[in-house]
Amino acid sequence: MMLFMKEYLAVATRRVLAGNNRFYLFLIFIFILSFLLRFYKLGQIPFGFSQDESAIGYNAYSILQTGKDEYGKFLPVYFKSFGDYKLPVYFYLTALSVKIFNLNEFSVRFSSALLGSVSVVILYFLVKDISGNKKMAGLSSFLLAINPWHLHFSRAAFEVNIALFFALFGVWMFVKFEKTKPIYLFISVLSFALSLYSYNVTRLLAPLLLTCLIIVCFDKVKIIPKKTIFALGIFFVFLLLPFLTTLFFPSGLLSSKGALITSSDIQSKIIEFKSYLADLPGIFPVAFFNDTFMLVWQYLENVVSSLSPAFFFVSGTAHGNQGIGVGMFYLFQFPLVILGLISIFKNKIKDLNLFIYWAIISFLVLSLSKEVPHATRGYFIVIPFQVFSAIGALYLLSLIKKFNNAVKIFSGVFFGFIVLFSVLYYFISYYFRFPILYAKAWRLEDKSVSLYIKDNEHKYDKIIFDKNAGFMYTSLLFYLSYTPLGFQNTVIRDPDDSEGFSFVRSFGKYEFRDVDWPNDYKKKRMLFITTADRKPLEIPPLVTFYYPKKPVVFSVKEKVISFPIEEIAYVLVETK
């Protein structure tokens, strides 16, 4: 991959220096921009470190040290973590980056940032090869480089970002296939397989996208020699063997059941609705409100809900670590997406139908989720929307060119201001507002507590984490670089609950449980990590950890009142 980028930059630089094509200077600018935006302060922002990131980082570290994950499984295909089973690609990529950069936030986020940067370049080549339009390709690539959704997911350890890269690369390799170069097909199949092993939703998305690609490019498929097709089939089945042999295991496809409309949450909603029909004739509930019909109706509701302009262009996701409180796309892209779709249908640009099918598949798969719209499960939508926006922008420009100079100047100033304000609003939100507003969601103070313990643990015989304080054991393992073998040999876990969660009870000198203050506080050399509301008032705190100050602004009788608050994250208490 690095060789690909090196070659790309070298070719672009040579063409610029030769003066043959200024457009390549723009391409170099796009790549540098995408790289800088994804790597600038990567280890510091997002502030904090989510529980999934610390789990990925520590399990990668454990693989490096022992060849086993935190559960003692040797080179697993699935990594059990917080009640679900994560797919392996990100873990093994992170093991490589941890080997190079040691165990820290940067190394865990490195793979996502790098492949996110490369995705921007691949999108250019994909759109150019499909449409033959360099302006459309360059604009699509530029929009992806600065896209809020793609930036956010590239700057943290989101497995779906890796899955998107491999799917995008797989599509490009398929499009580049020629009869004399069948190697492109094998690379494409390998990329789709890696996408499938990267994130749960892509176990549905990757095969559907590949099938769609075969249909769209059927003219190319027809010329593939039978021997090549047979070899591809054998290669694909070989790659999918681990997936197929575990398909119906708890760690396989069934591990996603709790996230789909077949989950107990949706079933309880259906049962609650049907309970009001008890007095109706029996044939009525059976004919119109049976479980199958209700599930289909729920799916149709999800399809409509997933088409949310507010989610995509205004407010974004409500999940604290999947967004920053702004739209997943810039607001100015809303009319451009619509214009782009109009242009495709109006001009009957068949070559671009692939991106329409890509969007449809993404929406249909997203609608299988029990929560819609959902930033992670709907992430694949980010690619076609950039292409639609680019087509829409070019279409709008062609319309404006028909008017006189005064209209052109006014339109340029007006749209330029809207675009500039949208971009500035996002970046100010990301670098100034987001780190403070979402510090709790990103578990900011887990690091501070862990480092304090690292410096002072020798003073205590037992360190007790109040079970209700919300501190994640993976944060402690990560920041202490806790010996993986020591953890595997001493960890005691509670049995899995009904949702598959397995809580750590203890390892080494660390315990995670309810604190029995009257008895525990009498013991010697103990350290407790709790919260302000759970600590008895009469017991003095040793150290108090606070989240960053944030402003609270509200209106009372048309008067705006503003004041800063400083929320307590954790309180540490020791016994003598």
Image: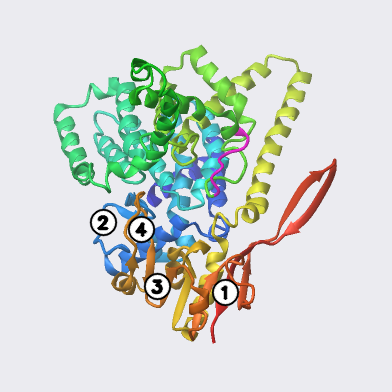
Res 17 seen here? no
- Residue sitting nearer the eye, 290 or 147: 290
Q: Which quadrant of the figure contains the C terminus?
A: bottom right
Q: Residue at x 18, y 44 (%)?
A: 245
Callout 4 crowding tier (Cα within 10 Å): few <14, some 14–19, many ≥20: some
Question: Height in image: 529 above or below 236?
Answer: below
Check disc 3 and give the amino acid type: Tyr
Residue annotated with mark 4:
502
Mark 3 or 1, nearer chain start: 3
Q: Position of residue 446 (x, y in %)?
A: 53, 65
Check disc 1 and give the amino acid type: Leu
Residue annotated with mark 3:
482
- Residue sitting nearer the eye, 365 or 536: 536
Q: Are marks 4 and 1 in contact (CB under 8 Å)?
A: no
- Residue sitting nearer the eye, 572 or 289: 289
Residue annotated with mark 1:
572
The local secondary structure at tag 3 comes to loop
- For the stretch drawn in magenta, the main secondary structure is loop
Question: Height in image: 37 above or below 201?
Answer: below
Tell whether position 461 is magenta.
no
User: Of circles 3 and 4, which is in front?
Assistant: 4
Range covered by the magenta-colored residues: 313-320
Mark 3 or 4, nearer chain start: 3
Q: CA distance from mark 3 to mark 2?
A: 20 Å
